[in-house]
Image (cartoon, grey):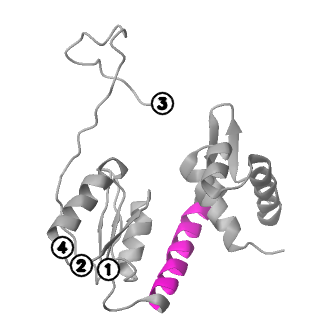
Amino acid sequence: MDLEIRHLRAMCAIAAAGSLSQAASRLGISQPSLTGLLQRMERLVNGQLFERSRTGVTPTGLGAQLVRRAQLLLAELETIGADLARDDTGPIRFGSVHMERVATLFQRLDHAFPDVRVSLTVEPSSTVLAHQLGRSSLDAAVLAVAEDRHIPLERNVAQRILLPWVPVYMALSASHPLAAARRAPNAVAR
């Protein structure tokens, strides 16, 4: 048996969710079915793809490498499908990684282009969105890039930096000891 598209989708879903149960829910299958599928994939590649712990799963070195390649392959497959189904009178195809702002973004696009259908793809990976732009399966996208990261864009993709940084907020219950403080103490993410 060889790796199949469903295996690639499962690997990407597990990596994105960080949990087998959440990934199974997103894929519309049971958690035991996904666990069995993951075990078959690990036998196929002769290695462990995810470290399992009580708090979830994280890709191993091999798993991270395969997930990156799977994301690119799945994006390419979507591009092929989009190219075959593409209608030049079709919608503006827009992608975004900013899930918390998707509704506002979609409303503004709809307002800016009232006579044009706008399709919106939400993808957690900026790398996948950049690849889709380069392969013309998206017309435009909002990407998020960490300061210490770089996403290579193909020559036919133009870019503009709209926000050099995005603020991140923290919410606490009113009864939490830090709720009365004007500023939260510096914390180290673990």
Which residue is identified by label 1?
Answer: 91
Percent position (x, y) of residue 140?
28, 73
- Between the C-alphas of marks 1 and 4, the distance is 10 Å
Residue 120, image x and y in percent? 36, 67
The residue carrying pointer 3 sits among few (fewer than 14), some (14 to 19) or many (20 or more) residues within 10 Å by Cα, namely few
Q: Which residue is mark 4?
A: 113
Mark 1 closeness class: few <14, some 14–19, many ≥20 residues within 10 Å: some
Q: Are marks 2 and 4 in contact (CB under 8 Å)?
A: yes
Tag 1–tag 2 contact (CB < 8 Å): yes
Is residue 60 in view?
Answer: no
Q: Residue at x 18, y 73 (%)?
A: 113
Q: CA distance from mark 1 to mark 3?
A: 42 Å
The residue tagged with tag 1: helix, strand or loop? Answer: loop
Q: Name which residue type carries label 4.
A: Phe
Badges 1 and 4: C-beta atoms under 8 Å apart?
no
The residue lying toward the viewer, choosing from 24 and 141, is 24
92 over 20 or under it: above or below: below
- Can you give x and y, in whole percent of width and height, for residue 52 in the image? 70, 40
Q: Earlier in the sequence, mark 1 or mark 3?
A: 1
State the residue position of label 3. Answer: 190
The stretch drawn in magenta includes residue 141: no
Magenta segment: 65-83
Q: Between label 1 and label 3, give the one nearer the viewer.
A: 1
